[in-house]
Amino acid sequence: MIQIGNVLERIKNEFYPSTKDNPSIISFDELFNITIKPKSILLFEPFDYHHECSPGFTKYFIDLGYNVDLLFSSVGIDSFSLYKRFEYIRFIIFNNWTQIQNNCEKLREFIKKYDYVLVQTTKKENFELNNKIGFFYLNNSIFILHRSDIFEKNIFINYYKKNRIWAIGNNSKGLLVNPHYFGDIKIKAKNNKTRFFLTSTECRNYALLMKSSQKLKNESFEFELIVTGRSKTLNSDIIPNNLRENFIFKFNTPYNELYKAVESSDYIIIPLDPKSRNDQIYKKDIVSGSFQLVYGFLKPALVDEVFAAFQHLNNENSLIYNNNNFYNIMKKAILLKQYEYKNLQDNIRVLEKEIYAESINNIRKSINA
């Protein structure tokens, strides 16, 4: 059983030592005794991932005048480490799916009290749980589809007609609502030693990155690459000895450390491969979390031209490459002048505001429906 007092103490010490407005953290066992404030949203994340989306969705609702209760596992709290004010937010922590499954009937009655319930991750794996809780039969449910293939379930048709299906990217299966707000971030100038950030992903090919990095190293360019992620596909074992000092590995890092790593970087490399069958879905279906970091932290991306347009990226706000010139683009990133770098950042800021405006207008459509 999770010790909520210990979690709260850790959160205060690690994230909010000088903040007066500490977050309200409630255990799942206390859930059915709490008072729900007028005009409230429940955000439910059943999985131990996608929590990087929670701060962004929360901000949209707060900007629209709602209170937000977040029902998720304790890992999710770290994703709010850059938030400074919590008067409109409460965290409700569950231990595991079993705890949810054993209280489905009580949950079904409880969530009816909210204006809306946002199911933040809707996948085939939690379809049965969502059905048991009753999300598919309530008038206040809104669903995030991170992949459009689940849309084949007929149950979503009515919610689609009511504008209650959201998508992180521009696909035809839902309204665009892109959560790219992380809190009080620091926008910084380009480092003297260029620092790239990337996420190690399962089944991804890093040969092009290795080849280009080695060439830059041989030519005495100074640069660093911060590698995060749950998968260790990209690891020190596949890196030549003379190149290892250029790599900083931060696997399975909590969100507060992840944010620090992004803030300290200059660029985000998103090494999607047009030849990879696994990466085809990023052309027009789903959005990598790395793109959220680009928008939220104003970090220009290095991304293949095949995937750039769907993610709203171009030569005005990022560095676009193809398989033939990735080395040249990495070199360009290193040599870019401060004013050129700031111009890219300014253009990402314009893009971010456009995405925010479209997203919050789409949320209004859902609420009005």
Image (cartoon, rainbow, N blue to C red):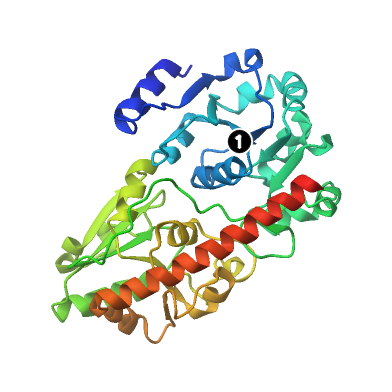
Q: Whole-percent x and y of residue 13?
A: 30, 27
Residue nearest the viewer, comparing 176 with 99: 176
On the question of residue 134 being in view, the answer is yes
- Residue 89, relative to residue 322: is it above or below? above
Residue drawn at point x = 53 percent, y = 31 percent: 89
Left or right? Give the position of 13 relative to 180: left
Please give the count of numbered marks on the rendered protein.
1
Is 163 situated above or below 127?
A: below
Vertical comparison of 56 with 172: above or below:
above
Please state if 219 lies on the left or on the right of 109 as rendered. left
Q: In the picture, residue 210 is in which quadrant?
A: bottom left
The residue shown at (44%, 38%) is 80
Can you give x and y, in whole percent of width and height, for residue 199 in the image? 39, 58
Q: Position of residue 124 (x, y in %)?
A: 70, 46
Say which element carries label 1: loop
* Residue under the point 35% across and 43% down: 253
Q: Is residue 202 visible?
A: no
Q: Amino acid at mark 1?
A: Pro
Q: Which residue is mark 1?
A: 46
138 relative to 120, above or below: above
Front in this rendered view, residue 67 or 74: 67
